[in-house]
Amino acid sequence: MKRSEVATKYKWDLESIYKTDEDWEKDFADIKSRMGELSAFEGKLNDIDTVRRFFVLSDDIDCKLSRLYAYAHMRKDENSALAKYVGMTDRAMQVYSAFSAESSFASPELISKSEEFLQELASHPSLVDYDYSIKELIRKKKHVLSDKEEKLMSMASVPLGGFKDIFGMADNVDLPLGTISVDGKKVQLTHGKYSQCLQHKDQSVRGKAFKTYYNSYEKLLNIICSTYAGSVKKDNFYARARGYNNCLEMKMYNENVPTAVYDNLLACVNKNLPILHKYVALRKKVLGLDTLNMYDMYVSVASADISVEFEEAFEIVKNGLAPLGKEYSELLQTAKDERWMDVYETENKRSGAYSSGSYGTKPFVLLNYSKTTHDVFTIAHELGHSIHSYYSEKNQPYPKSSYEIFVAEVASTVNEVLLLKHLISKAEDKELKKFLLSYYLDMFRTTLFRQTMFAEFEKIAHDADDNGQALTVDYLNGEYYALNKKYYGKSVQHNKQIAFEWARIPHFYTSFYVYKYATGITSAVTIANNILKDKSYVDRYKSFLSAGSSASPYDILKITGVDLAKSEPFEVAMQEFADTLAQLEELYED
């Protein structure tokens, strides 16, 4: 479908950012001409007024740059074939890079000041919008090295920073993905096509896709292993150089999240793996397979689906999120009426979905709605991000308006959980109810259990390197294969190729990141249950949505009553998984 064929009400209102491209060009020229103003402050951040003026100038430029980039990249995503917007996006990124370079002196210069001076900055009324970020400089000060050492660390960052790019080239360019036959047609595998094939009803198609896909990785396994081993060594080098006990401690400290959160996640998930094994056994039984393979884990165990037009899907989402109250419901309607969303797939439009925008713009949502259950939940998920952004920006000044990654998936997942619980409670058709319950269980399996398995693998790899173990293909394959067997249990055939699934996970090159997906759904379950039990809890939840980055993400999450340094939220999530599984088992026994 061409974009011109889509009704205006289903296209996002980017004209509210810039009425014309010419207006964008004026702002771009203005910002570019002001970049030199920043460097004038270098070496002069010695008093409160100078620091304040630098922060205000930096934020003004940063905010306008964010607006420029938001407009350009969303225009590009409407139609990636339009060279004009590809160029505008690249130009915005180039100026962003220049801005980062021009202002890069500030943090090192400030962190080198005495703690007394920084405390004075943090407590001064004129810098109240920056108090948390200044306190973070103070907290991290003990891990800052001498000027000479910091210069060496900065110089090392370029040669040590390429492992992710090397993997990206191997994974997206050099990977020799083959072809398979699907329904009598020859299909060239891609990462996306592979995912689709794993959901095919014919087990032989799933098997062919799996073997062909992993055969491709096996051919590059040595180079990928060397790349990942180098990335792990880089992580551990930085941790040791900055005086941390290990890389995990460094990562958690930099996020201002207790390491106990990571430890709790691994411990609680491992304790409850028998429940996952029970679900895997049910999948095997329901699918009627003599052998359940790892490539059979993504096909649905129920044949129902929610296939409705967008208007009906939106009403389903609104009804499902009604427990969040009148104000939240009105915001959902505003998102539709004021065109936050770009709804339909069109020619050359970016695939997938996201929430985007900048401070002072609408919190836009890109969709590619195509009448599937997943697409209905995507509406709820992405609007969860956008309304989180709306509340944070409405209630926080620009320096505190962006929430951290640690809490970024909470609001979106709360929406999915609320919508699922609503649909399950209303489902009268037995097959639909089976489908919804299995959908929920698979959310847990892929987001909580699988991401925790990834998180455990990362810890094993980093600890092994710290202890002098060579990260060879055989070692990494062996550790990953053992984890796969531990997590999925005896009801599934642990196909030999699954041993090197680790070699295809791009998130491993941003170490100790994936655990946040698992803690996100863990937090969302407790929050959703509290919303459904107590109407007054919604105000507490809105305080969380409104907090931005005004405190540590761990403390902000605690506003909801969820303390991930304790075991309770994880136990609640595991009980939810067990209860949902019991409901599904009961339906299959009837």
Image (spheres, rainbow, N blue to C red):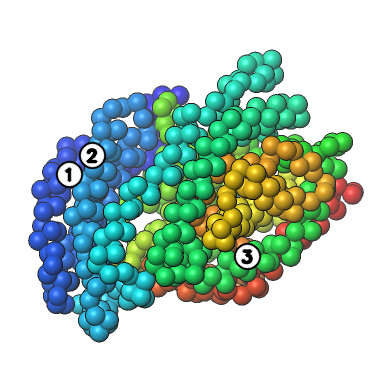
Q: CA distance from mark 3 to mark 2?
A: 42 Å
Q: Residue at x 32, y 48 (%)?
A: 158
Which residue in the protein does label 2 denote?
91
Q: Are marks 1 and 2 in contact (CB under 8 Å)?
A: yes
Q: CA distance from mark 1 to mark 3?
A: 45 Å
Residue 549: which quarter of the image?
Answer: bottom left
The three-letter code of the residue at mark 3 reads Leu
Q: Nearer the viewer, mark 3 or mark 2?
A: 3
Relative to 324, is 430 on the left or the right? right
Measured as percent of width and height from the top left, residue 7 is found at 41, 32
Q: Which of 64/242 is in front?
A: 242
Relative to 163, is 88 on the left or the right? left
Return the mark for residue 28: 1
Residue 288: which quarter of the image?
Answer: top right
Query: If you read the primary sequence from the N terminus, does the residue marked by circle 1 or circle 2 appear first?
Result: 1
Which residue in the protein does label 3 denote?
265
Q: Residue at x 81, y 53 (%)?
A: 278
Query: If you read the primary sequence from the N terminus, does the residue marked by circle 1 or circle 3 appear first?
Result: 1
Measured as percent of width and height from the top left, residue 554 is found at 49, 71
Query: If you read the primary sequence from the N terminus, does the residue marked by circle 3 or circle 2 appear first?
Result: 2
Where's the N terminus, which quadrant? top left
Q: Are marks 1 and 3 in contact (CB under 8 Å)?
A: no
* Element at label 2: helix
The residue carrying pointer 1 sits among few (fewer than 14), some (14 to 19) or many (20 or more) residues within 10 Å by Cα, namely some
Q: Nearer the viewer, mark 1 or mark 2?
A: 2
- Asked if residue 516 is positioned above or below residue 339 in the image, the reply reads below
- Asked if residue 68 is positioned above or below residue 272 in the image, the reply reads above
Q: Residue at x 68, y 66 (%)?
A: 268
